Amino acid sequence: MMKMTGKAFAKKLFGARYERLSRTLLMDVIIFWGLYIAGFQVQIAASVRILMINAFTAGIMWQALSSRDNTVELKHMLMLPQQPKEFVFSYVAVLGGYTVLTKTGLLLAVLLAVSAWKPIELAGMAISMLHAVLMAAAAYSLRKYWYAGGFWAVAMVSAILFCGSRTWFGLLLLANSFIAILILRKAEVYAFYQGESEKHHAIRQRKKASLWRYFFRYLSCHKNYLVNTGVMWCVAIVMPYFLREMAGLSVVPVGFSILSLNTPICILLSCDRDLEQAVRFLPGQRRRFCIPYCLFIFSCNMAADAIFLCSWQIQNGGVTVLMIAGAVFFALQSAVLSVLLEWFYPIRGWKIESDLWHHPRKYVVPVVILLLAGAVCAWPVLLYVLLALLAVEIPVCWCKLLANA
């Protein structure tokens, strides 16, 4: 039964013939070899390397466990007779393999290519990935006791930072992994099943309910989206400290472009197939949906930019009206480009929501904004020209495009 369950989930995640796995591994090899022959080297402490692998793997594993698409699959699988312990471990093993092979593998390829390492450290990295998968799954099964999981995570992060470079630290990770296994042995199968109502009740609205109410309900039902937004706000607070040496107007647009990398709010149609079908099926929904959606993303971007400017003023000083106008310009550009990508080029063929968060398309808008910010950094007078276009011509063109696309 355990083998059958694991095979069913593996085929869903990796494809019927596991073709996705071969493509991903080939991409990892290409990235590793390309960076290795480039000769680019960075000194990375062992503790930092272990922390990166643990945090990244645990985060992706948590996203995979929280996936709405997995909830549907679990609902079907739980209708069949099964052994709870075998089911839990097969489910965790398949999601862990998906996380390590398709996501962490890319990070590992980059770390191995750009930093010096010893064979014994490679074993430590493998233990770190196993530890992150087991700990994330165990903490997820105990998410009702979130305070215990939070204390556990903080304790492990502190241990990695202070003791991660010790040769015996791998034994500590193995011991913690054993504790996670004991927790999973006692975990109920339904601890991994959230129920569809938890994810879907956000779209049940009154006939005259506004889209803004839907947006905020959607965020309230997806706590990880709120966490990602909170992380971006924390980045906005600390970024002026790292940009202090380059203080001035020329570097501020770069901060705006970095803060536009808020993936969850920019994939609303891609991650909710029911909503996309309803929006595209009903008449006149292009204008009624796209414009409020654009304003919603713009509001989220402006919130991060406002925090960034306030932090800049506190730490460096010198915030001007032109900087504020630049924040409005870059936030609106990012919002419009994100909505146009979602409408014309939604992401298809994804397996779980983690694929959406890490799809290469997420970098298209930030890269475009970063290039535009680079041009402004090189020629500050260009910002005046862009603001003039924004105030006169661009809003009219965008409104026509969104209304008649």
Image (spheres, rainbow, N blue to C red):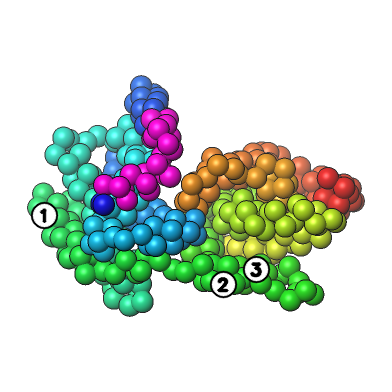
Which residue lies at the image location 70% right of the left edge and 63% below the top edge? 296
Give the CA distance from mark 2 to mark 3: 12 Å
Residue at 48% over, 59% down: 72
- Tell me the quarter of the picture where residue 299 sits: bottom right
Q: Mark 2, residues whose alpha carbon is within 10 Å: few (<14), some, or many (≥20)?
A: some
Going by the numbered disc 3, the residue's amino acid type is Ile
Residue 171 got which mark? Answer: 1
In the image, residue 271 lies at what x, y percent? 58, 54
Disc 3 marks which residue?
A: 203
Q: Earlier in the sequence, mark 2 or mark 1?
A: 1
SS state under label 1 = helix
Please say whether residue 392 is visible from this viewpoint: yes
Which residue range is magenta in the image? 3-24
Q: Nearer the viewer, residue 298 or 404?
A: 404
Q: Is residue 15 left or right of residue 400?
A: left
Residue 31 x/y as whole percent: 40, 29
Residue 62, image quadrant: bottom left
Residue 310, by quadrant, is bottom right
Number of the front mark, 2 or 1: 2
Disc number for residue 220: 2
Taking the magenta stretch, the answer to whether it contains residue 8 is yes
Going from N to C along the chain, the mark reached first, 1 or 3, is 1
Report the amino acid beneath label 2.
Ser
- Residue appearing at x 14%, y 52% in the figure: 170
